[in-house]
Image (spheres, grey):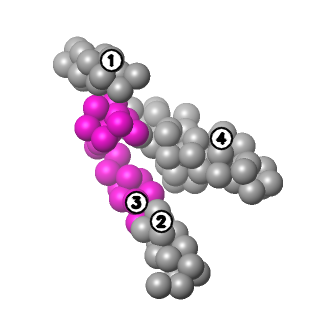
Amino acid sequence: MADTTQTELEAAAFRRLVAHLQERTDVQNIDLMNLAGFCRNCLSRWYAEEAEARGVDVSKDAAREHVYGMPYAEWKSKYQAEASAEQKAAFSEASKQHG
């Protein structure tokens, strides 16, 4: 497979992942962290870090807006729920194992 084709496929998969996460507002970041070890904030941070590595200025807020599909504060006010005791305990345990 040509490098450009691989890059195009990876970019398309990334766009689908972002679109999927934007549609699944019912899935909380803590759930993603507990199950997969990353969340929307991680993805936006990786996006900004890769931009910086290539000399492109993408702010933390711009990267989050790209991933969330709206300003982060708006997403939080619309969709973020208080984490349950069980979610917090699972996060704490996962952090111990991987941190």
- Please name the residue shown 50% across and 77% down the image: 6
Q: Nearer the viewer, residue 22 or 98?
A: 98
Measure the alpha-carbon separation of dots 2 and 4: 18 Å
Res 31 → quadrant: top left
Spatial CA span between label 3 and label 2: 5 Å
Identify the disc placed on residue 15. 2
The segment highlighted magenta reads 16-38
Q: Dot 2 surroundings within 10 Å: few (below 14), some, or many (20 or more)?
A: few
Q: Are marks 2 and 1 in contact (CB under 8 Å)?
A: no
Residue 17 is marked as: 3
> Is residue 84 toward the left or the right of residue 6 in the image?
left
Mark closest to the chain's N terminus, 3 or 1:
3
In this rendering, which labeled residue sits more in front, label 4 or label 1?
1
Q: Which mark is residue 61?
A: 4
- First in residue order: circle 4 vs circle 1: 4
| Residue 1 seen in this snapshot | yes
Mark number displayed over residue 96: 1
Residue 94 x %, y %: 29, 24
Image depth: mark 3 or mark 1 in front? 1
User: Seen in the image, is 88 located left or right of residue 75?
Assistant: left
Disc on the earlier residue, 2 or 1: 2
Magenta span has 34?
yes
Pointers 3 and 2 in contact (CB under 8 A)?
yes
Say whether marks 3 and 1 touch (CB < 8 Å). no
In this view of the protein, can residue 70 be seen by the observer? Answer: no
Q: Percent position (x, y) of residue 10?
A: 48, 69
Seen at 40% across and 39% down, the residue is 38
Q: Secondary structure at mark 2?
A: helix
